Image: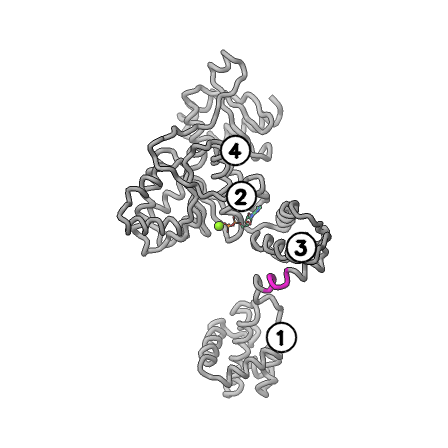
Amino acid sequence: MTENERIFWNRVLELAQSQLKQATFDFFVSDAKLIKVEQNQATILIDDMKKLFWEKNLQPVLLTAGFEVFNTELLITYVFEEDQAEKGDSSAPQSQKSPVLETLPSVHPDLNPKYSFDNFVIGDENRWAFTASTAVADLPGSAYNPLFIYGGPGLGKTHLLNAIGNAVLAENPQARIKYISAENFINEFVVHIRLQNMDELKQKFRSLDLLLIDDIQSLAKKSLAATQEEFFNTFNALHDNNKQIVLTSDRTPDDLNDLEQRLVTRFKWGLTVNITPPDFETRVAILNNKIQEYNYQFLPETIEYLAGQFDSNVRDLEGALKDISLVANFKNLDLITVEVAAEAIRARKQDSNPKMTIIPIEKIQKEVSKFYGVTVKEIQSTKRNQDIVLARQVAMYLARELTDNSLPKIGKEFGGRDHSTVLHAYNKIKNMLEQDDSLRIEMDTIKNKIK
Ligand code: ADP
Ligand code: MG
């Protein structure tokens, strides 16, 4: 056994011991042996009657230890005592194929073939989500069930969900797979209720091998109690039969307010993984991955420039490449410089950061006081003259509207006022603007001076 194999196996035993009751550990785990780890594949010798237990309960442990020691997700192969005796070191086939049920209605998986594990760029922010997704695709129903992936928009949740489906389909073309957004699930439910053929819907969803539900937060509404009930029954039917369910959401199960508690509880039965926004390095890696297909070149500094411009989501990075692509094709460019990129993405940058223009609050105070013939000091003071109060409130309104500063920060810049004062001023001016044409014109004049 190599040093790494030894460390890996010790870690597996340690993790298993910490998670299982002693008697369970003694019975199922203590006599298992690691045969080898080779080419990302761990071969483990167990008693064949214990295989199901290992698949159901120890897959996460094996993956975790594999990840820690070999920095990759291991494929696990079990071999059994008899195999060892008869054929030496042969591996038993792994994937549990579900029986083909000829009588069932066919189901369209609705997968997007564009999304695969191969074209998903791994960074620290999505590594666990990726690893868990591949584990689920390798052993649907046995690794983690359900797998619950959550994170902000444009971070690859839909991508991973489809990648799982595509991988399972490639391995087993007979598998009954369905990708559906929770939104469409709700729609289907409503349509079937109206057409009074709920049985068909039930049969369709409950006979699946793999159900991929995107954006489950849409189901979290009080008004959808009946749909939640149907989803609950579908979930149970699938889970009871070891059929895999994967869910994505923009928030954690616990934050799905207005979702029935029993569903929240079930969502937490398996594994919950988070995806966070990519850091700079990952953004560079994603860009480099995506530009491979283009027939023009990017300067490395252009890539770094782009990675610096959009930092919260991958969809924006892709959008930026599309903007550049338009320009490059139109102008027949074969090298993308920082200047070209900056010009191409200008509109998008403003869209994604409407309040980006950095206007100092000072500047707003200065222009507003000039306009109303008061001093900046007076705006920041507590004086209650009508003119000063109006100028102060207009300035606070603009500070809120034109800058990214928080209410407390704005309050601080106005002589240390409370954030509720700023909010009050903002609302008051906002209401006045709706009724008072001359104030609206004044406001536009001031704004033009500030920008
Ligand atoms: P979400 O469902 O989380 O809102 P998507 O899966 O729709 O996000 O991702 C938005 C876009 O960004 C998709 O085109 C997807 O392929 C791409 N994307 C997101 N994360 C990655 C990644 N890690 N590697 C490659 N492409 C990614
Ligand atoms: Mg999505």
Query: What residue is shown with label 2?
Result: 115
Nearer to me, 198 or 415: 198
Evaluate if marks 3 and 4 touch, with contact meaning CB atoms under 8 Å apart: no
Q: What segment carries the magenta color?
A: 345-350
Residue 391 sits in which quadrant? Answer: bottom right
Among the two numbered marks 3 and 4 on one chain, the one whose residue lies closer to the N terminus: 4
**Depth-wise, is mark 1 or mark 4 nearer the camera?**
1
Q: Is residue 282 left or right of residue 138?
A: right
The residue type indicated by label 4 comes to Leu
Secondary structure found at label 4: helix
Measure how far apart labels 1 and 3 are at the Cα level. 34 Å
Whether disc 4's CB lies below 8 Å from ligand 1 is answered no
The residues bearing labels 3 and 2 have C-alpha atoms spaced at a distance of: 25 Å
Mark 3 C-beta closer than 8 Å to ligand 1: no
| Disc 1 residue type (three-letter) | Lys
Residue 246 in sight from this viewpoint: no
Q: CA distance from mark 3 to mark 4?
A: 45 Å
* Residue drawn 62% across the image and 75% down it: 451
Magenta stretch, main secondary structure class: helix
Residue located beneath label 4 in the image: 63
The amino acid type found where label 3 is placed reads: Asn
CB contact under 8 Å: marks 3 and 2: no
CA distance separating discs 1 and 4: 55 Å
Question: How dense is the environment of label 1, judged by Cα within 10 Å: few (below 14), some, or many (20 and up)?
Answer: few
Specify few, some or many for label 4: CA neighbours under 10 Å numbering under 14, 14-19, or 20 or more.
many
Some atom of ligand 1 lies within 8 Å of the CB belonging to the residue at label 2:
yes
Callout 2 secondary element: loop
Residue 347 belongs to magenta span: yes
**In this figure, which residue is indicated by the disc labeled 1?**
451
Eye-nearest disc, 2 or 1 = 2
